[in-house]
Image (cartoon, rainbow, N blue to C red):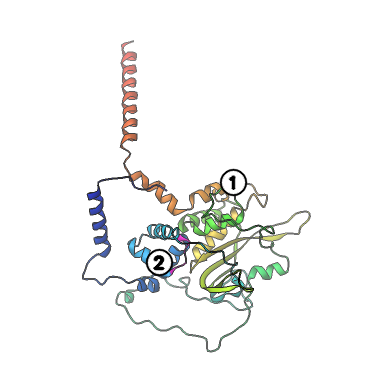
Amino acid sequence: MYVAVKGGETAIRNAHRLLADKRRGDRSVPSIRLDQIVEQLALGVDRVMAEGSLYDLELAALAIKQARGDMIEAIFLVRAYRTTLPRFGYTLPVETAAMAIERRISATFKDLPGGQLLGPTFDYTHRLLDPELAADAAVEAPEERVEETHEPAPRVTDILGHHGMIETDGELPEGTAPGDLTREPLAFPLERDLRLQALARGDEGFLLGLAYSTQRGYARSHPFVGEIRIGEVEVELEVAELDFPLTLGRIRLTECQMVNQFKGSAKQPPQFTRGYGLVFGQSERKAMSMSLCDRALRARELGEDITAAAQDEEFVISHSDNVQSTGFVEHLKLPHYVDFQAELDLVRRMRAEHERRDVQEAAE
């Protein structure tokens, strides 16, 4: 990551004061509170938590406020804070099949065990500005079910897998622990566990563009949304002193299971392949993009030709991190006086040589 070079302390101090002033804005307007950001800008908070790799609503809200709404700067702040936290263990894999579901849709089956739940979504809204929001109009309370239903809601891929219609979910070899890209430098080629970690932290816009490219023919992809589910899951940690896992709390997740191009062989009948996405908070677009990119990046594993950018592991993973990308691009704002003067002198000498050659050719 590139960092700022030393400069005039007075100028930098004044720039910080000006930034604080611009952040606060008009003093006659009430300062926005963190709880307002958490409650009313929830999707922005979820994105900062997801790409910052830290599940903390209040810290994400603070980062958004400090960054004046610049999401990548907020993500950078959260990542920087994350590096100061002690690590005391790894939790068990969360069980999304036992999720307390608030939204669940499938584009592959209309009738599912547990039903489809539309939940909070923009999918069915008209994209028209609502002037009533500017006036802070009262909002009706949502309708609630009179009786709670406890019908199981198995994942669509589990249903397909029961009949052998989709490949088994990928598992690490026995005795192998998942990698951790925040502690070890990446070395290509990557295993799928590290790729999924990188995609979960990746920039939503970058992954969305790659996912879109796969649908336009720049990879072997014919996707169906097997299922998107949003809800809370329990997080558990195994403690040496206890013979049962300890529940630490609940977190909200978005999971996407994408059903993709089928494949078979002489030893195995045709079956669908899959792509996977899992993101903090409510972030369907990111989870879908992640699952499409995950499937594209499995090209080598599935014996497919690598012909598109979304299938190129080094290209995707090395350029998906918005904090790293921002640092590399924005470092161009820093002084490059010596480098530029050297190139400027080189161009001048080359031009002088070019002019001398023209004069000689004219004289001949």
What segment is highlighted magenta in the picture? 52-56
Q: Indicate the quadrant where residue 22 lies.
A: bottom left
- On the image, the x and y values in percent for residue 159 come to 68, 71
In the drawing, does residue 249 fall left or right of residue 158? left
Foreground mark, 1 or 2, reads 2
User: Is 55 one of the magenta-colored residues?
Assistant: yes
Q: Which residue is mark 2?
A: 59
Q: Nearer the viewer, residue 109 or 154?
A: 154
Indicate the secondary structure of the residue bearing disc 2: helix
Report the quarter where the C terminus lies. top left
Q: Nearer the viewer, residue 80 or 194?
A: 80
Is residue 232 in view from this perspective?
A: no
Q: Amino acid at mark 2?
A: Leu
- On the image, the x and y values in percent for residue 296 come to 59, 54
User: Is 208 one of the magenta-colored residues?
Assistant: no
- On the image, the x and y values in percent for residue 81 come to 41, 60
Q: Nearer the viewer, residue 86 or 72?
A: 86
* 329 up-or-down from 138: above or below: above
Q: Amino acid at mark 1?
A: Thr
- On the image, the x and y values in percent for residue 313 come to 57, 49
In the drawing, does residue 168 fall left or right of residue 125? right
Characterize the local packing of mark 2: few (<14), some (14-19) or many (20 or more) Cα atoms within 10 angstroms.
Answer: many
**Mark 1 to mark 2 CA distance (whole Å):** 41 Å
* 309 up-or-down from 152: above or below: above
* 142 up-or-down from 81: above or below: below
Q: Which residue is mark 1?
A: 307
N-term mark: 1 or 2:
2
Characterize the local packing of mark 1: few (<14), some (14-19) or many (20 or more) Cα atoms within 10 angstroms.
Answer: few
Task: Tell me the chief SS of the magenta region.
Answer: loop
Indicate the secondary structure of the residue bearing disc 1: loop
Is residue 217 in view from this perspective?
A: yes
Q: Residue furthest right?
A: 267
